[in-house]
């Protein structure tokens, strides 16, 4: 890569930030990742979604050069994860699921250590440190010993540390797991701010459905394979129907009228009329204009990513996690099939 | 297949909001010898920072050597005065204590790799764009430095056991302590790389380090021992650190030749008396060998 002498900025971003082709990882008999392929564009916030044991962490480990692929290829920031391991490492930032801070050191010492390990130019260490710590609101606490920090503060500090060397791709493995809703929200606002300010590509795993909606695109992984990959809106549209709930003065007449006028099959649930319809927001104006029965209130609820996950995997994320037997029996069946 | 988002650069085309400072961008350079040295230095510094942050550890690692020196030394004095030719037993075991204070501290430093693994910090170092060997070397130099500081504390006690504060002696002892500490840390790191739990490491320390210390001749002269103990003593690497330390200390004492011969018999391979320089070389070569194994092991882990 060429750099102009007067530009201290990053190497120019050309091509996708992440490109993965037929990536496979097997541990003995277990095929943790079974041939996944995808690309992540530069500047994208890419979500990797799936239950525990779906192969998310294994995939992220291969992309971060922490695990060697059994077969297939992957490149991150334009560098091959196997052949150009160090080049990949120079260009990525990592925030792990488990904390990796030194609790005996202060926040600033932790960041300084990171900067030294990554060879950040000495004169830029301090201003960069101030910037990333300001972003996560920890600059005032820079001389506090990390061991005394709360879980949310540590996670914020880890995000700041992952950014110390201006990575082009930031990997976040379950960045908000175990945090309270307020901290989760603030972490998401940092992530969005980051993406705007630093022109960074963000690759994250999560199994919080509500968070996945913040991503530009989502890949849903189940049993080592990608079962869906699209923007959240597209994924939800693919599920088909929005759910519409209306209150009327005369429910029986309304249900009959719905069937007669629009061919919709509705039913009463918890004192309201409920029915499903594609593109609910377009249907509601029609409903008001044409419906004979007076309507007191209306509510549209969009399909959630839980519905999406359900439609692709036949189970909710929570059920998928709580039922290891299902996975085990699948693995056993595969082992038997191979004989 | 990828949907390209609206160009991310478009947001930075406009003037940045007034409240925001411009983004400080840094660039991670290609790996060079300089960056490896920087990595070694910061891993080393972390050991130092942690050592001085943990005052309790400075005390706890001192307790054991001091118990041996003053309690065992004073307690056994009455039994052994005939055998020591009038030399205070504390004076006799003092060089051994100089060695083992370093031994325990260095093993403790190596143990921090296990802590780092348990608390996840090791991963932060493993994914950095530096050689694994830099991390191991930094760790070993750090362990050596910390153990050296601990050694200085024990050196300060020389006056209490009738050993003079001779500058040359202090320098020689310090050099040997640093060398021993480096080798022991390398040994500890070699063990620690494969161990995931602190409890297991502590168990191994009990199983390996305590016998090493007892067999080394830190508490008794390494001559006229039963055959099995003689063999074990000659195998024990610590023997080759304790013996030169004793010689250096005794060189600065006024002892009658009889006492000197009984208390400082030297280490013999059959009839060959191993010279100090060779003993030092043994410690150095073993240390470098174990460092090599530690680096190899550390690099092999995913």
Image (cartoon, coloured by chain):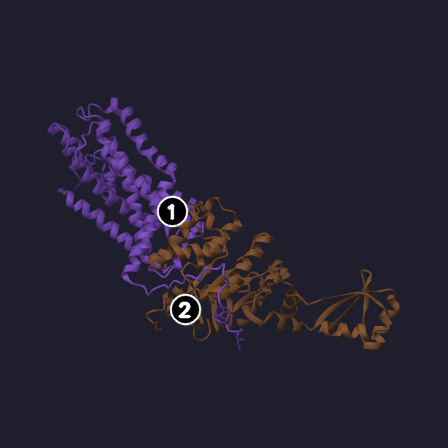
Which quadrant of the figure contains the N terminus of chain A?
Answer: bottom left
From the viewer's perspective, is residue B129 above or below residue A257? Answer: above
Question: Residue most toward the left?
Answer: B257
Q: Which residue is mark 1?
A: B112
Q: Residue at x 23, y 25 (%)?
A: B80
Classify mark 1: residues with Cα within 10 Å, few (<14), some (14-19) or many (20+).
Answer: many
- Give me the disc on residue B251: none
Residue A206 picture quarter: bottom right
Left or right of residue A208, residue A65 in this image = left
Q: Nearer the viewer, residue B117 or B219?
A: B117
Image: B212 above or below A89: above
Where does label 2 land, which residue? Answer: A81
- Against A45, residue B182 (above or below) is above
Q: Is residue A181 left or right of residue A244?
A: left
Instruction: Tell which subunit mark 1 falls on.
Output: B
Q: Residue at x 31, y 31 (%)?
A: B66
Q: Position of residue A17 (x, y in %)?
A: 46, 71
Most foreground residue, A285 or B184: A285
Q: Which chain is purple?
A: B
Q: Are marks 2 and 1 on the same chain?
A: no
Q: Are marks 2 and 1 in contact (CB under 8 Å)?
A: no
Going by the picture, which residue comes out furthest to the top?
B78
Q: Chain ID for label 2?
A: A
Check disc 2 and report its element: helix, strand or loop.
loop
Residue A234 x, y percent position in the rendering: 62, 73
- Label the brown chain with its letter: A
State the image coordinates of residue A276 (x, y, percent, origin top left): 75, 70
Q: Looking at the image, which residue is at 57% across and 65% down?
A: A49
Residue A172, can we see it?
A: yes
């Amino acid at each position: 890569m060429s750099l102009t002498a007067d530009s201290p900025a990053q190497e120019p971003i050309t091509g996708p930030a992440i490109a993965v082709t037929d990536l496979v990882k097997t541990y003995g008999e277990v095929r943790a990742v079974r041939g996944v392929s995808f690309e992540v564009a530069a500047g994208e916030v890419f979500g990797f979604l799936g239950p525990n044991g779906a192969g998310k962490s294994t995939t992220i480990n291969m992309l971060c050069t922490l695990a060697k692929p059994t077969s297939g290829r992957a490149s991150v920031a334009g560098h091959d994860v196997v052949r150009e391991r160090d080049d990949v490492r120079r260009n990525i930032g990592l925030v792990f699921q488990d904390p990796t801070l030194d609790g005996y050191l202060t926040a600033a010492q932790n960041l300084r250590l990171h900067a030294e390990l990554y060879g950040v130019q000495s004169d830029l260490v301090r201003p960069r440190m101030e910037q990333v710590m300001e972003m996560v609101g920890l600059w005032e606490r820079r001389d506090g010993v990390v061991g005394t920090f709360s879980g949310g503060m540590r996670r914020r500090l880890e995000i700041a540390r992952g950014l110390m060397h201006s990575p082009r791709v930031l990997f976040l493995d379950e960045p908000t797991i175990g945090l309270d809703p307020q901290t989760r929200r603030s972490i998401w606002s940092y992530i969005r701010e980051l993406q705007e300010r630093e022109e960074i590509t963000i690759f994250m795993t999560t199994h919080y459905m509500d968070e996945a909606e913040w991503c530009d695109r989502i890949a849903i992984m189940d049993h080592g394979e990608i079962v869906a990959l699209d923007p959240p809106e597209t994924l939800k549209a693919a599920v088909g129907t929005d759910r519409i709930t209306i209150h009327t003065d005369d429910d029986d007449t309304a249900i009959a009228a719905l069937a007669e006028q629009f061919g919709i099959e509705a039913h009463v649930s918890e004192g309201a009329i409920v029915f499903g319809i594609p593109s609910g927001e377009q249907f509601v104006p029609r409903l008001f204009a044409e419906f004979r029965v007076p309507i007191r209130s209306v509510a549209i609820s969009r399909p959630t990513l839980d519905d999406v996950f359900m439609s692709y995997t036949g189970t909710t994320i929570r059920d998928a996690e709580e039922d290891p037997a299902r996975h085990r029996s699948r693995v056993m069946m595969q082992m038997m099939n191979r004989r | 297949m990828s949907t390209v988002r609206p160009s991310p650069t478009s947001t930075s085309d406009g003037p940045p909001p007034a409240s925001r400072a411009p983004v400080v961008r840094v660039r991670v350079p290609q790996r060079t010898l300089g960056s490896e040295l920087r990595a070694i230095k910061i891993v080393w510094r972390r050991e130092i920072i942690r050592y001085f942050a943990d005052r309790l550890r400075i005390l706890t690692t001192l307790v054991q050597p001091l118990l041996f020196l003053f309690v065992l030394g004073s307690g056994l004095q009455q039994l052994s005065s005939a055998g020591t030719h009038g030399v205070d037993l504390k004076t006799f075991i003092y060089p051994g204590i100089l060695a083992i204070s370093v031994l325990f501290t260095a093993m403790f430093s190596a143990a921090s790799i296990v802590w780092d693994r348990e608390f996840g910090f090791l991963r932060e170092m493993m994914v950095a764009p530096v050689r694994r060997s830099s991390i191991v070397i930094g760790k070993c130099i750090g362990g050596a430095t910390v153990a050296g500081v601990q050694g200085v504390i024990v050196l300060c006690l020389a006056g209490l056991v009738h050993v003079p504060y001779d500058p040359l002696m202090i320098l020689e002892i310090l050099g040997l302590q640093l060398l021993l500490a480096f080798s022991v840390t390398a040994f500890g790191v070699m063990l620690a790389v494969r161990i995931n739990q602190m409890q297991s490491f502590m168990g191994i320390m009990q199983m390996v380090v305590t016998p090493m210390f007892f067999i080394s001749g830190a508490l008794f002269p390494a001559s006229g021992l039963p055959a099995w103990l003689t063999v074990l003593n000659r195998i024990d690497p610590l023997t080759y650190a304790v013996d030169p330390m004793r010689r250096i200390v005794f060189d600065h004492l006024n002892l009658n030749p009889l006492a000197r011969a009984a208390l400082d018999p030297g280490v013999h391979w059959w009839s060959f008396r191993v010279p100090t320089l060779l003993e030092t070389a043994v410690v150095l070569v073993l240390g470098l060998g174990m460092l090599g194994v530690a680096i190899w092991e550390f690099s092999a882990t995913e």
